[in-house]
Structures are given as structure tokens and as C-alpha cells.
Image (cartoon, helix red, strand yellow):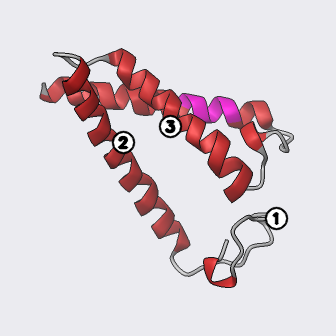
Amino acid sequence: MVIKKERYVRNSLVDDDEVKNELLWGYLIHYGIGIIYGLIYVILNNIFFDYPSIFIAYLFGFITVLGAWCYLMPFAYNLGFFASKSNQRFHILAQNLIVHFVFGTGLFIGYYITY
């Protein structure tokens, strides 16, 4: 997707031209967002609980995967909501859910260790 060309929805990832340093930028933005989510998790824990909560960590992990399923897949990857256009729908959804479950676990462990 190249915003300069006023194209905001991809037809296919395969047809896109490679952009210089896009992989690096993708990783930086992805992990930067993860850090912001981590800070939000800590703030929510401090507001609602006196101790680290695994429940909020897993809820947060699930909410973040909903963002991928409902925003990234249909608009950035052209896979449809919840990967409905993909032949590997179950595999994609399961993999995303597992990874974000691990992310939630990491949030909890990181906050628990520093608590």
C-alpha cells in the first residue's frame, strides 16, 4: 500500500511493489505498538487492581487480536474480516490467537516480575 499513490486498500500483497526498508519499518511499528499496549496494560492494572492481573492481560491480548482480524486483514491484507477470503482461515486465526495469547502472558509476567 502506497499512500503517495492514494491507494489505501490492497488488492493483493503479491502485486505490491517493495518499498525500501518496509520490513524494518513494519517491525519497528509493530513492536512500538506492542510497547504502547504494554504501558496501557500497566495503567489499567493500576486503576482496577492492586496486583498484576492475568485476566486483564488475556483480555488485552484478545482485544488486540480483534484489531488485526477486523482492521488489518480486510484493509491491509485484503483477506476479509476474520480472514474470510483465505483458504487457510482457521490456520491464520488460530496462529494470531495463540501469538496474542503469548503476548498477554508476556505482559502479565513482565508486570508481575517488576511488581
Report the side of 22 relative to 106 (left or right): right
**Residue 80 x, y percent position in the rendering:** 78, 46
**Residue 114 x, y percent position in the rendering:** 13, 29
Element carrying mark 2: helix
Q: Residue at x 73, y 64 (%)?
A: 9
Q: Looking at the picture, which amino acid does disc 1 mark?
A: Asn
Q: Circle 3 is placed at which residue position?
A: 64
- Pick the quarter of the image with the C terminus: top left
Q: Circle 2 is placed at which residue position?
A: 37
Element carrying mark 1: loop
**Residue 51 x, y percent position in the rendering:** 18, 16
Q: Residue at x 76, y 30 (%)?
A: 90
- The magenta segment: 93-98
**Numbered circle sitting on residue 92:** none
Where 88 falls versus 8 (above or below)? above
Between the residue at mark 3 and the residue at mark 1, the CA separation in whole angstroms equals 24 Å
> Residue 90: within the magenta?
no
Mark with earlier residue (1, 2): 1
Element carrying mark 3: helix
**Numbered circle sitting on residue 11:** 1
Report the side of 111 relative to 28 (left or right): left
